[in-house]
């Protein structure tokens, strides 16, 4: 129901009040698939995030399936504290707003000066627990990066007491899920995406794809800079495919080995177009098998490192 400049969404859990034209409530206008807003649940008064999907995409299977996957992955990860609403010909995804800071901000001086290396390892172990929780729901996130990880601010004010949350499941998919409709390539993020995503080998996408991205993400948390970043996206992709994680003196002893195992890759001696898809699959599979098979195993190695 539209009430002047307000929109009321009637869901099963609550009724939500959205002000789509108020800049104070707009998180991301006109994204590729949706626009994102802050809104409020009228019954509980709780702040929520609402994604309004662009209706012109519904007829395209690759985008409609993406909407459904995001809704299901969000619901499973949040223990059903989310809902997909279809109203007036438009789909809306509603989920709880999380008060906190993302991992990018934790690398800044205001926060990092408060943490010892042991503290950061404790945060890393917590974060791996959240990734394992997602994987047990049967989904691969496919967009793990610092901007998509939030740590909530607890009442104590100590971030070490906070909880990590994974957000934005817009690229989530089942392991080895085929591409759909007229989709030709898997979307991916520069810096963090595993080679199987970059090279569009969807049949190799697995939980280890997220573990790779988590290895890169945690490297940035400790090193306080992005690996491989250049001013040229094509050069960045080339470096991603051919170079391991750099060395950094800011990593604790023994942590470098954990991250390199998580982000294991084949260092292609020639550009990818020199190889057939079968050859690329064989080479990349060897590297994927060297990664941690589960987030729990990676967390266990980090906890062992903390105890030393």
Image (cartoon, rainbow, N blue to C red):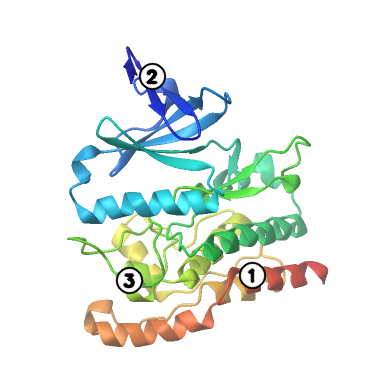
- How far is mark 3 from mark 2, CA to CA? 39 Å
Pick the quarter of the image with the N terminus: top left
Q: Which residue is mark 1?
A: 296
Q: Are marks 2 and 1 in contact (CB under 8 Å)?
A: no
**Which quadrant of the figure has residue 90?**
top left
**Residue positioned 36% across, 67% down in the render:** 197
- Element at label 2: loop
Q: Residues within 10 Å of mark 1 (few under 14, many from 20)?
A: some
Q: Residues within 10 Å of mark 3 (few under 14, many from 20)?
A: some
Q: Which residue is mark 3?
A: 202
- Element at label 3: helix
Q: Position of residue 120 (x, y in %)?
A: 70, 56
**Residue positioned 34% across, 65% down in the render:** 237
Q: Nearer the viewer, residue 184 or 218?
A: 184
N-terminal label among 2 and 1: 2
**Residue positioned 50% across, 69% down in the render:** 212
Q: For the view shown, which residue lies furthest in the front direction?
A: 12
- Element at label 1: helix
Q: Which residue is mark 2?
A: 22
């Amino acid at each position: 129901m539209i009430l002047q400049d307000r929109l009321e969404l009637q869901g099963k859990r609550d009724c939500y009040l959205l002000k789509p034209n108020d800049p104070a409530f707009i998180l991301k206008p006109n994204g590729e698939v949706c626009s994102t807003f802050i809104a409020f649940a009228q019954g509980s008064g709780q702040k929520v995030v609402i994604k309004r999907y662009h209706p012109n995409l519904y007829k395209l299977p690759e985008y409609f399936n993406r909407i459904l996957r995001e809704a299901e992955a969000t619901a499973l990860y949040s223990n059903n504290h989310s809902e997909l609403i279809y109203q007036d010909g438009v789909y809306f995804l509603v989920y709880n707003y999380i008060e906190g800071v993302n991992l990018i901000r934790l690398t800044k001086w205001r926060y990092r000066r408060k943490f010892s290396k042991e503290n950061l390892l404790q945060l890393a172990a917590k974060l791996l627990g959240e990734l394992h929780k997602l994987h047990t729901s049967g989904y691969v996130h496919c967009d793990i990066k610092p901007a998509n990880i939030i740590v909530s601010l607890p009442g104590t004010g100590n971030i070490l007491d906070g909880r990590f949350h994974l957000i934005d499941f817009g690229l989530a998919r089942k392991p080895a899920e085929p591409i759909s409709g007229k989709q030709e390539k898997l979307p991916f993020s520069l810096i963090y995406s595993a080679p199987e995503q970059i090279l569009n080998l969807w049949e190799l996408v697995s939980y280890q794809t997220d573990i790779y991205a988590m290895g890169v993400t945690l490297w940035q948390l400790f090193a306080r800079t992005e690996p491989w970043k250049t001013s040229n996206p094509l050069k960045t992709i080339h470096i991603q495919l051919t170079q391991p994680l750099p060395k950094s003196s800011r990593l604790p002893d023994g942590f470098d080995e954990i991250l390199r195992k998580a982000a294991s890759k084949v260092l292609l001696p020639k550009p990818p177009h020199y190889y057939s898809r079968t050859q690329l699959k064989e080479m990349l599979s060897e590297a994927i098998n060297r990664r941690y098979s589960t987030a729990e195993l990676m967390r266990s190695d980090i906890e062992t490192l903390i105890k030393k």
